[in-house]
Image (cartoon, helix red, strand yellow):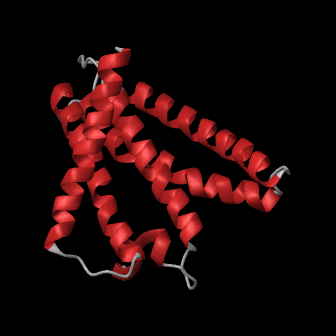
């Protein structure tokens, strides 16, 4: 079976016959960053033990954020437009919020590997946190692609800055709430 490298590398933002419009792309990028930051904020204060590595906390945070995001967007739409969302608009809001759900996949896989004993729980948690930070920094590639730019050395600096900003947001949340 042949793998379509273009579709794998460029995902749903770029693999369709008609590119995603900027508004929907922006909504998905926003949800992606928001979801990843909240997953990271859920991971950082988790105390790892042999039997428990935080999967439930990550999943709970992700699912509640997903539902809250859709609800908030629907309320915001009704204020902006003076009308309730249509069925098509509701489906679009759900689809644009899916990146929040995707934020939990890699960390939960890594935490599950720790849970079954292939990694020490603390190592699994650290790797999950690093994976989320890399996902956050990687959004630079998507944004550059949306703007029709080719990768450059400056993108690494931008990715590092985005990761540092995300980390500072997470640390602020952890320090103020835990």
Q: Is residue 97 left or right of residue 178?
A: right
Q: Residue furthest right?
A: 83
- 64 shown above or below 90: above
| Camera-nearest residue between 172 and 18 | 172
Image spot of residue 9 (x, y percent): 34, 73
Horizontal and vertical percent for residue 92? Answer: 68, 60
Q: In this view of the protein, can residue 1 be seen by the observer?
A: no
Q: In this view, does 80 lie to the left or right of 49?
A: right
Number of on-image labels:
0
Name the residue rendered at 81%, 57% in the picture.
87
Residue 155 makes an appearance in the image: yes
Q: Which of 116 and 124 is in front in this view?
A: 124
**31 displayed left or right of 51:** right
Q: In which quarter of the image is the C terminus?
A: top left
Residue visible at 58% across and 66% down?
Answer: 23
Name the residue: 19% across, 34% down: 126
Image quarter of residue 132: top left
* Quarter of the rendering occupied by the N terminus: bottom left
Whether residue 138 is situated above or below residue 58 in the rendered picture: below
Q: Is residue 101 above or below residue 50?
A: below
x%, y% of residue 36? 38, 44
115 or 175, which lies in front? 175
Q: In this view, does 67 lie to the left or right of 134?
A: right
Residue 75 point in image, percent of width and height: 73, 42
Residue that sits furthest to the bottom in the current view: 17
């Amino acid at each position: 079976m042949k793998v379509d490298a273009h579709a794998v590398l460029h995902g749903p933002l770029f693999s369709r016959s008609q590119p995603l419009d900027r508004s929907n792309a922006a909504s998905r990028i926003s949800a992606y960053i928001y979801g990843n930051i909240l997953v990271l904020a859920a991971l950082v204060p988790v105390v790892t033990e042999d039997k428990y590595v935080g999967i439930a906390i990550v999943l709970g945070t992700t699912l509640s954020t997903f539902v809250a995001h859709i609800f908030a967007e629907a309320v915001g739409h009704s204020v902006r437009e003076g009308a309730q969302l249509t069925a098509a608009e509701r489906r679009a809001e759900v689809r644009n919020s899916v990146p929040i759900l995707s934020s939990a996949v890699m960390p939960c896989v890594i935490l599950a590997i720790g849970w079954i004993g292939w990694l020490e729980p603390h190592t699994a948690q650290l790797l999950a946190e690093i994976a989320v930070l890399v996902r956050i920094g990687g959004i630079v590639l998507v944004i550059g692609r949306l703007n029709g730019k080719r990768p450059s050395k400056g993108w690494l600096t931008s990715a590092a800055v985005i990761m540092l900003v995300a980390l500072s947001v997470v640390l602020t949340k952890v320090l103020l709430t835990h």
